[in-house]
Image (spheres, rainbow, N blue to C red):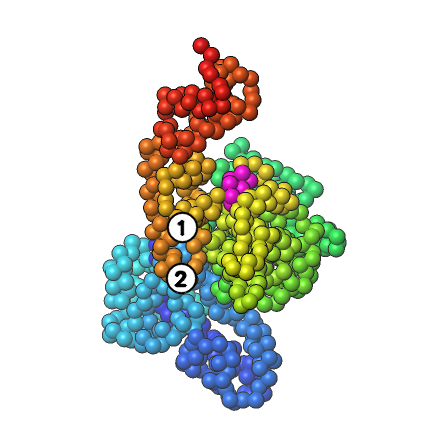
Amino acid sequence: MTLFDSIIFDMDGTLWDATDSYARVWNTTLAQMGYPDVRIDAEQVASCMGMTLDKILDTLISLPLDRGAFLKALEENERKMMPHLGGQLFDGVAYGVSWLSSRYKLFMVSNCGPDGLRNFLRFTGLTDFFTDTLSHGENGKSKAQNIREIVEKHNLKAPAYVGDTQGDADSAREAGVAMVAARYGFGKVKGADMAVDSFDDLTRLFMLQLPIIGNFSCDEIAMVGRVADSLGLDCYAVGGYVRDTFLNRDSKDVDFVAVGSGIALAEAVKAEMGKKARLSVFKNFGTAHITCGDVELEFVGARKESYRRESRKPIVEDGTLDDDLSRRDFTINAMAVAVNAPKFGSLIDPFNGVADLRKHIIRTPLDPDITYSDDPLRMLRAIRFATQLGFTIHPDSFDAIGRNVERIKIISEERIVDELMKIMASPKPSVGWMLLESSGLLALVCPELQALKGVDTINGRGHKDNFLHTLQVLDNVAAKSDNVWLRWAALFHDIAKPVTKRWDEKAGWTFHNHNFVGAKMIPGIFRRMKMPMNEHLKYVQKLVELHMRPIALVEDVVTDSAVRRMLFEAADDIDDLMILCEADITSKNVDKVQRFLDNYQVVRRKLVEIEEKDRIRNFQPPISGEDIMRIFDIPQSREVGLIKDAIKDAILDGVIPNERDAAYDFMFRHAATIGLKPVD
């Protein structure tokens, strides 16, 4: 059972002291740089909240500083002087507050006026994390009254108040809420329900009150820690689970790194979990996997890796936690959370992954050229994460992709497609394909798409950039459907335009039959990329071939016959075809777009009417080839096919209804025209 449902912070002691700490760090750094008489106080720092460091330097200090040396010294002093806030001040606070805000409602009370409160929140980047804030320096109410107002206004059932003075404790008691004393503020407090010595401890305290972390029960994760303790192993949850916890995304599994034998730890955890758990051990890789219902736990020993140039498979040695985190692909995946009892919940973030999460940056922990060359799949993973999360790849890490694109050739097509599928399942998949193109990877991963890029011009007449058009269609489809294979159809719908492009003096640029040629190209692309050669191939191929059919309808009179044929050929995929075709309208001419959309509505109404009346979708002619051979006493032959096609066309053209008696009458009349008579 969760002990608290919300947290009310006293800004002045529990968070504002961070600003004062930051001022002290600046003053120490200035003294080291030869300016011991230049002093900055907390209010001056607060006045610069929301500014970049360079802007703060411009505002606060008019000195001939070596800015690079100053900022380097400042960072080092942050780490030395504020270890309880996670090293770098605002990243440390943000780690705790962002994590807590994903699990609890957060509120703040303050003595300062509204400007000071807003400035503080803006400077520390915490504005979005708090549901409500009240300042008794502004409204004149007591601290206890403001606490009660927050509790009543937001109907809080089990709030905790975090403060650092005896007055805070008294206010909490008067307001009737639990008090957590932050001893890293002003110090000793009597009558508090709980106490912590650092902001990190505060975060951990509230973490332990939760029944779950991500998708996993805190008991399960703590159990792994207890087993690790019994074996004398340091153990950490690492990688994607930690990242997704900060992002408040569901995790399907937890990866654990043990400093020692991951397999031995997994075997002991399996014994603790009992018969309900299933253990798989992979000794060659030094890993083990436990499945227990919906819970999946992965175990590995901490290791360091080295690579041969011709392979992405590493040479593995036992290593430390630092070694293990250093070998990971990106800073946001190179974080660990301790699960051993004494340190449960402590964050290890040697490469400032939390800062990159806050800034929405994908960055390699080490030299990106080495990271990508060692395992070139990481280039695709960088693009995939940027697409999935809406992040930006750091310029250094992105530029290194361009220098290492040829290395992608040592990666199997299956692994490449796995990353591409994740890009395609993202909310806005065009982001990934744009990054693939601009990085140089697209020409190697899918040259047919690269060929769509660019515009040719003759006599001042150019065509649209078919690559950009394709990506717009892809995003349009993604906004309407999660069907990843419909998205692939959108990506490939114009794939044959480069090979069918022709210049006509009268018509300009033409792409005649690009839909039919494109459909023929699909199997070759799927085969080369090791995509599934099954019903997914047939589905994509069908939609590529048919994607011009509805457009042809809306540009002409929408006849019942044309709609019947489209319904027959698209069958159960007719709705997806219509989504694709409507997404294909990317003109900047508003009137033209509206005209097409209106006509598509006519087509949709016709589809419903004809399906209800004629039952065309997935229909088979009411007379089979066997019926024709029996009735006319002929063997399997060309004539049988001619009669079957004539019956089908008559139904689709509306000459006869889709009924057996009408089809029989038509069959006898048509057979007579080719000299066939029924046998009595």
Identified at 48% across, 81% down, the residue is 56
Q: Which of these two is toward me, 527 or 497?
A: 497
Identified at 53% across, 36% down, the residue is 535
Q: Amino acid at mark 2?
A: Asn
Q: Which of these two is toward me, 280 or 519?
A: 519
Q: Can residue 523 be seen by looking at this rendering?
A: yes
> What quarter of the picture does the C terminus occupy?
top left
Mark 2, residue position: 589
Mark 1, residue position: 555
Q: Position of residue 34 (x, y in %)?
A: 58, 87
Judged from the image, the secondary structure of the residue bearing numbered disc 1 is: loop
Q: Is residue 563 above or below residue 70?
A: above
Judged from the image, the secondary structure of the residue bearing numbered disc 2 is: loop
Q: Position of residue 600 (x, y in %)?
A: 37, 48
Residue 133: image quadrant is: bottom left
Identified at 33% across, 33% down, the residue is 612
Whether residue 544 is in magenta: the answer is: yes
Question: Is residue 12 shown left or right of residue 475?
Answer: left
Q: Position of residue 437 (x, y in %)?
A: 59, 59
Q: Amino acid at mark 1?
A: Glu
Badge 2 crowding class, 10 Å Cα cut-off, few under 14, some 14 to 19, many 20 or more, is: few
Whether residue 576 is in magenta: the answer is: no
> Which residue is the extreme one toward the top?
680
Q: Can residue 244 be seen by looking at this rendering?
A: no
Q: Position of residue 364 (x, y in %)?
A: 61, 62
Q: Is residue 249 above or below residue 527?
A: below
Magenta span of residues: 537-545
Q: Main secondary structure of the magenta part?
A: helix
Identified at 60% across, 79% down, the residue is 68
Q: Nearer the viewer, mark 1 or mark 2?
A: 1
